[in-house]
Amino acid sequence: MTEIDIIERLRQKLPVFPRSGIVLGVGDDCAVFRPKSSPEDLLVTTDLLVEGIHFLPSTHLPEDVGHKAVARGLSDIAAMGGDPRFCLLSVALAPGMEGAWMGRFYRGALRLAGIHKLTIAGGDLAHAARFTCDVVVCGAVPRGEALTRSGARPGDSIYISGALGGSALGLESRSSAARNRHLRPEPRVALGRFLRRQVHASAAMDLSDGISLDLHRLSVASGVSAVIDHPLPSFPGASVEQVLHGGEDYELLFT
Amino acid sequence: MTEIDIIERLRQKLPVFPRSGIVLGVGDDCAVFRPKSSPEDLLVTTDLLVEGIHFLPSTHLPEDVGHKAVARGLSDIAAMGGDPRFCLLSVALAPGMEGAWMGRFYRGALRLAGIHKLTIAGGDLAHAARFTCDVVVCGAVPRGEALTRSGARPGDSIYISGALGGSALGLESRSSAARNRHLRPEPRVALGRFLRRQVHASAAMDLSDGISLDLHRLSVASGVSAVIDHPLPSFPGASVEQVLHGGEDYELLFT
């Protein structure tokens, strides 16, 4: 069973209780919570970062890991056009990480959070055999204005915010620009806000698993098909494979 | 460095940005977010559950693990007198857990969520060497009415909602009542709401690490000292050690 099957099977079973305040649940970049009588909706997203799966201690400095943990969540907020507000960091430390490593991890996380004026409001601390971290990021949009995956309509044009394949290239090569893109992805928060406010994009999502899979997801969510009739913007040096299927570019896909 | 030292050191470094909406950050059972112009505050808490640390596959059924993951978060909402609203579940599955195990884990989580009308609104799915799960639970209270750890005043009486040491006893023995308490803790959500609405408790928190440590935390947060001049309510069969230092009872401590 793939991740998509699991989520789809689960989603069908999940009741949305009327008092929950949830107006958009499982299946988009963030859940959308509507506070009583408020002019703003709250966007909530959560992302795991697991040692050995999402990063390697041999290639990622502790600061890179902290940066990436926060960047993944911020990218989801960007995808829905949100203003970052606060986050919670849950961290399970592996043996030997309690001292300097952890200090440097938090330094990387705090630096990126500070750039986006994201308050760290809580979290949990535990121990594990391997470092694992879960980051919850919350953002806000004016009521009803969150960009979603399901808004695309027949005839809409499809756009990508930047070059693809850089992160995948950076994982496999020593190219410093690509390497940096892999280690320190920059979430497109300002662009996401611009797409919501000025461009009035009909749909948006972030590219975390590669355009080949993510464009399919957006199409399915919107109930439309997609045609690629222009060359894709490629990161210099990236292979076709990396451009199409490379994950973690954290660019925005929008219509 | 202990967990308390780490959190304290970190807390001093964390800026709260004015636009974040956060009115209570790191250090209580939940963070408190105040949505613009809303009559309600949102409580947000996140808790890790790590295989080998918080549960053992040999003693916990998958349903118990799902139950416990959600119970930990609900107990934090109860501690602040909140109404549960929604949650997000991030799960890193270990090899071999993709099929039946996972189905049973979600069954346990969904059952407890259903009892408390807690909508599952999102999450993340990944893989890891050992099962790890992070649960974010959100609840609501009328604006400014969250019960906190810091509200106790000199002269307040100290109360505990039930017998202590049951979970620790259940971990070490085959006593079925204690065993059940360890495997399926019941978060005191209705009681927490009652304490906020009817009792107007001055301070509250949940007992997750044992009364010896948690009463100290409440005292420090409130800037008062505490005197225990009555026998503590003990779970039948629990040792003094288990009553004082046993964790995971998830009863409420309040003043």
Image: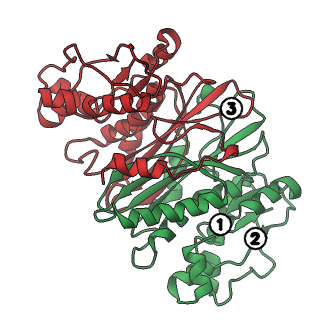
Chain colours: A green, B red
Q: Secondary structure beneath disc 2?
A: strand
Instruction: Find out whether the residues at labels 1 and 3 contact each other: C-beta distance under 8 Å.
Output: no
Whole-percent x and y of residue B57?
24, 48
| Residue B179 appears in the rendering | no
Q: Chain of mark 3?
A: A
Specify the label residue A35 is tagged with: 3
- The residue wearing badge 2 is A160
Q: Quadrant of residue A206?
A: bottom right
* Residue A91 - label: none
The C terminus of chain B appears in which quarter of the rendering?
top left
**Considering only order in the chain, which callout, 2 or 1, is on the residue closer to the N terminus?**
2
Pointer 2: residues within 10 angstroms few (<14), some, or many (20+)? some
Q: Mark 3 Cα within 10 Å, few/some/many (few <14, many 20+)?
A: many
* Alpha-carbon span between mark 3 and mark 2: 32 Å
Location of residue A125 in the rendering, given as x and y in whole percent from the top left corner: 38, 49
Which residue is pictured at 50% across the width and 63% down the height? Answer: A107
Q: How many marks?
A: 3
Choose between B237 and B203: the one closer to the eye.
Answer: B203
The residue lying at 75 percent from left, 47 percent from top is: A146
Chain name for mark 1: A
